[in-house]
Amino acid sequence: MATDYTFPDTAAKTAAGAQEFETEKMSLSMGPSHPSTHGVLRLQMELDGEILTKCDPVIGYLHRGDEKIAENMTYNQFVPYTDRLDYLAPLANNMAYAIAVEKLAKLEVPARCQAIRVITAELARISSHLMGLGAFGIDTGAWSVFMYCFTEREKLYKLFEELTGARFTTSYSRIGGLQRDVPEGWTDRVNAFCDQFLPILDEILALLTRNKIFMDRTVDVGIITKADAISYGLTGPNARGSGVSVDLRKDKPYSGYEQYEFDVPVGTKGDCYDRYLVRGEEMKQAVRIVKQAVAKFPGGPWYATEAKKIFGPPKEKVLSSMEELIQNFMLVTEGPQMPAGEVYFEAENPKGALGFFVVSKGGGVPWRLKIRSPSFCNLSILPKMCVGNLVSDVVSILGSLDFVMGECDR
């Protein structure tokens, strides 16, 4: 005869313990030094098995106080700091900041300057998307895509170095113009790059677009509805991937964008796959804009010659004229003299709308400068879009958002 050694109270405790174990959740920290976080981002996740029930982004690891630094810098001295925002597209950052300050000064730059800025901004868009696409490929297991993308990106960096003297931190724009004019034959080399890039881009995209593994990792993963994209303030490819047809180059054209023909790609589902498709098409449209700008490339000055209190005189005049030497000395020591007032300008950067709010009380230094960084706003939707997904899906979601912590933390 079998004897039951289980006491009633013990059995009840065992059942209660099992129920408690079933509902127990695990806290997991991803980052800030995780390869899929694309920078110093930390995700504090709560898991029920492999499913996320909570995801809180922890930022601030790269905070440098750029906005406060701007209050102690002349307007031109702050240009190199804009390189460190979205450091994958410094030429576009330089352009957005320069236009904001020029708007404050009510200054219109010549057509040649505008065309050069458009060319450099679109090349920066291609460079940034290549980096994002290559990293996204590695996140989802495609190594070859990364190598293809970086090969093309290296060609762009050679063009950037010819133009600005630097590969990474360009500091090219100036208030009222540019650092220098384009070197001889540079636009022809830009045209040659565009011609050879398009077939290679098609080859890169063909590695992913119908790739079964890539589609399994991205289709119906990390869906952002159109309403959520708008309410969370998403901009750029992340918003357009959700069906929000907003592009500042079309809606509020600046720097002569109204004279170029290009399409704005828009997604339907708002998943990781749509965001990938939008960026792939944006690179093709960027090439289209660059080729038009090169074909229409205007002559004339590349800086505002009439703005003597804002843009420095040519070096040869500084070395030969006392008046020009004094003017240069005043600009360097006191900065370009701006009227009192406040302006806000935002440009369509690769990551989204990059905005600068400048408050001036007159003189050569801003009283206050606020930066609206697209990556910061784009990351705000993570707590909502990650919930209900697998841990492995978080890697795909982060890659599809294509953020940069340099501009998120500032």
Image (cartoon, rainbow, N blue to C red):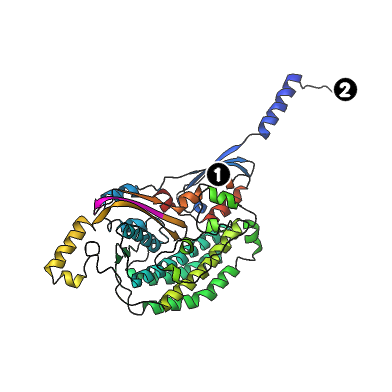
Q: Which residue is mark 2?
A: 1
Left or right: residue 1 versus residue 349 is right
Q: Is any part of residue 162 visible from this angle?
A: no
As displayed, is residue 340 above or below residue 20? Answer: below
- Residue type pointed to by label 1: Pro
Q: Identify the magenta region.
A: 355-365
Residue 353 in the image: x percent, y percent? 45, 56
Q: Quadrant of the N terminus?
A: top right
As displayed, is residue 241 above or below residue 23? Answer: below
Q: Which mark is residue 183?
A: none
Left or right: residue 185 versus residue 39 is left
Residue 70 in the image: x percent, y percent? 30, 51
Query: Label 2 vs label 1: CA separation?
Result: 59 Å
Residue at 55% x, 66% y is 280
Secondary structure beneath disc 2? loop
As displayed, is residue 297 above or below residue 104? Answer: below
Q: Which mark is residue 383?
A: 1
Residue 182 lies in what quarter of the image?
A: bottom left
Secondary structure beneath disc 1? helix
First in sequence, mark 2 or 1: give its number: 2
Residue 331 in the image: x percent, y percent? 20, 60
Residue 61 in the image: x percent, y percent? 41, 46
Within-10-Å neighbours for mark 2: few <14, some 14–19, many 20+: few
Main SS of the magenta part reads strand
36 magenta-colored? no
The residue closer to the viewer here, 315 or 312, is 312
